[in-house]
Image (cartoon, rainbow, N blue to C red):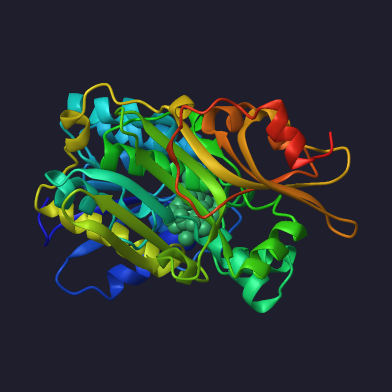
């Protein structure tokens, strides 16, 4: 494929698909044209000539006039069929579907190797931020210790609107949907699952680990309590949904997506609206920070455009960290985290799950909270974590290797004076 002859078979003509059309119209220097568009809904009026559209997947995949497939649909199962079908036909693919990628990453890496056909997905993690290719190429030799970021635009938009502008959760979510930031199923955003899927991609390209999404502890923003918000306000902290992956000294990796209290001087505390921010931590460069729009039509399409351009010079992911690392795995049992847990009477967390309880508080009006240290595996397995009426927010300290300390002694629990 050369820069003067990019013939795109496009799937999806929604927010990102139309964004790609806009971006291509305004990009001199790359002669790309959309040859066919696969969509689903026969009743929709389209802004382009009807003969461009089809409802048959194979009409696009088998069209010999098209030399690249761009998959921009919101159905992960159908996206999987499109992407694997294209790779098996030897057609290079660009996709934005992080759910599909996270669920099938190992298989898709294998398929690229078997077919010798590239699959690029810069927009699937952090939309317009150029993170995947940077993690893959720039940090090829200076090995990364951690990535930490706000990697979902909708939840950041909602939290910003609620805390800065005093908008309700429902109104902020509705606006994020109108603006094209939210997933078609917004539960993926607000329950933290979209951030988790993106973290799977970052783990592979930053730390050389292909994780199963369901193995990553994930808490979204729907349960953040009023008491947690007032705790944040009183301490001068902000709550953001943060995804974090960190190498532990024994070689394992701790990873989680958690609402997190951040100090105002933290880079991520100043990431607002639908913006994303990603911090990398490596041995030689130390700390670096990427900032940019994490959702929306044209910003997302700009990353798709960049992938199309990369294909014209033969670029493909080599999954360099996967080659460099041997047998790296998630190790939640070797990690711990400091959390704020708020709860009401009759909804207390299991105190014995904590290795240390730092503070305990009760307010007649607002309920109870405790702060403490808990093993990541313990927290993930805790039945109380998913109970209504209990809210868990990470304290500002990063994930870290678990200390040898035993779980809270009876005396410590007694001293903390928590209710049962
Ligand atoms: N919106 C954003 O900011 C970002 C989105 N993404 C990802 O990009 C993808 C697209 O998102 P977005 O554009 O917002 O979604 P939209 O809901 O706006 O558009 C979805 C498109 O997919 C088409 N579609 C759905 N199911 C099928 C199917 N079975 N066969 C063919 N076409 C189908 C729809 O067809 P029809 O028009 O007929 O309804 C529609 O054109 C998703 O994977 C999303 O996660 C990634 C980064 C940012
Ligand atoms: N729904 C996603 C869209 C981009 O990936 C988000 O809000 O981040």
Name the quadrant containing residue 240.
Answer: bottom right
Q: Position of residue 327 (x, y in %)?
A: 27, 21
Q: Is residue 402 left or right of residue 360?
A: left
Total number of numbered labels? 0
Residue 251 vs 267, above or below: the answer is above
Above or below, comparing residue 176 to residue 120 in the picture? below
What is the x, y in percent for residue 255? 44, 38
Which quadrant would residue 131 be assigned to in this image? bottom left
Q: Nearer the viewer, residue 14 or 397?
A: 397
**Residue at coordinates 49% horizontally, 56% vertically from top-left?**
152
Q: Residue 123 at what x, y percent from top left?
A: 35, 55
Q: Quadrant of the C terminus?
A: top right
In this rendering, does residue 14 appear at all?
Answer: no
Horizontally, is 10 left or right of 332 in the view?
left
Relative side of 364 to 225, left or right: right
Is residue 351 shown left or right of residue 40?
right
Residue drawn at 15 percent across, 47 percent down: 142
Please say whether residue 146 is visible from this viewpoint. yes
Where in the figure is residue 391, as x and y percent of width and height?
Answer: 71, 47
Front-most of 138 and 335?
Answer: 335
**In this view, which residue lies farthest toward the top?**
327
């Amino acid at each position: 494929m050369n820069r003067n002859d990019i013939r795109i078979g496009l799937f999806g003509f929604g927010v990102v698909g139309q964004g790609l059309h806009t971006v291509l119209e305004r990009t001199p220097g790359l002669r790309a044209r959309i040859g066919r568009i696969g969509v689903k809904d026969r009743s929709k009026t389209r802004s382009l000539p009807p003969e461009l559209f089809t409802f048959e997947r194979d009409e696009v995949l088998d069209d010999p006039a098209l030399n690249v497939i761009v998959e921009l649909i919101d159905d992960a199962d159908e996206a999987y069929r499109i992407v694997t079908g294209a790779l098996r036909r030897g057609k290079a693919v660009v996709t934005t579907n992080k759910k599909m990628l996270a669920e099938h990453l190992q298989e898709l890496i294998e398929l690229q190797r078997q077919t010798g056909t590239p699959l690029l997905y810069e927009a699937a993690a952090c939309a317009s931020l150029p993170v995947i290719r940077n993690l893959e190429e720039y940090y090829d030799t200076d090995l990364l210790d951690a990535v930490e970021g706000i990697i979902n635009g909708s939840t950041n938009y909602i939290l910003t609107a609620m805390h800065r502008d005093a908008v309700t959760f429902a109104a902020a979510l509705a606006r994020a949907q109108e603006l094209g930031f939210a997933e078609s199923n917004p539960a993926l955003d607000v329950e933290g699952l979209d951030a988790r899927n993106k973290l799977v991609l970052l783990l592979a390209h930053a730390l050389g680990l292909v994780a199963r999404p369901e193995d990553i502890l994930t808490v979204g923003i729907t349960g953040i309590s009023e008491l947690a918000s007032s705790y944040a306000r009183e301490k001068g902290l902000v709550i953001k949904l943060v995804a974090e992956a960190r190498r532990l000294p024994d070689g394992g990796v701790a990873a989680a997506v958690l609402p997190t209290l951040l100090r105002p001087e933290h880079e991520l505390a100043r990431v607002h609206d639908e913006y994303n921010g990603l911090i990398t931590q490596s041995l030689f460069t130390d700390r670096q920070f990427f900032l940019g729009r994490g959702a929306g039509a044209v910003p997302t399409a700009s990353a798709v455009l960049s992938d199309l351009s990369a294909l014209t010079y033969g670029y493909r992911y080599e999954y360099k960290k996967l080659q460099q690392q041997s047998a790296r795995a998630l190790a939640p049992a070797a990690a711990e985290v400091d959390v704020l847990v708020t709860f009401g009477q009759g909804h207390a967390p299991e105190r014995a799950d904590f290795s240390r309880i730092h503070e305990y508080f009760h307010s007649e009006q607002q309920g109870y909270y405790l702060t403490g240290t808990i093993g990541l595996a313990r927290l993930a397995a805790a039945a109380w974590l998913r109970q209504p009426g209990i809210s868990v927010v990470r304290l500002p300290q990063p994930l870290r290797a678990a200390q040898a300390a035993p779980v809270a002694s009876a005396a410590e629990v007694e001293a903390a004076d928590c209710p049962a």
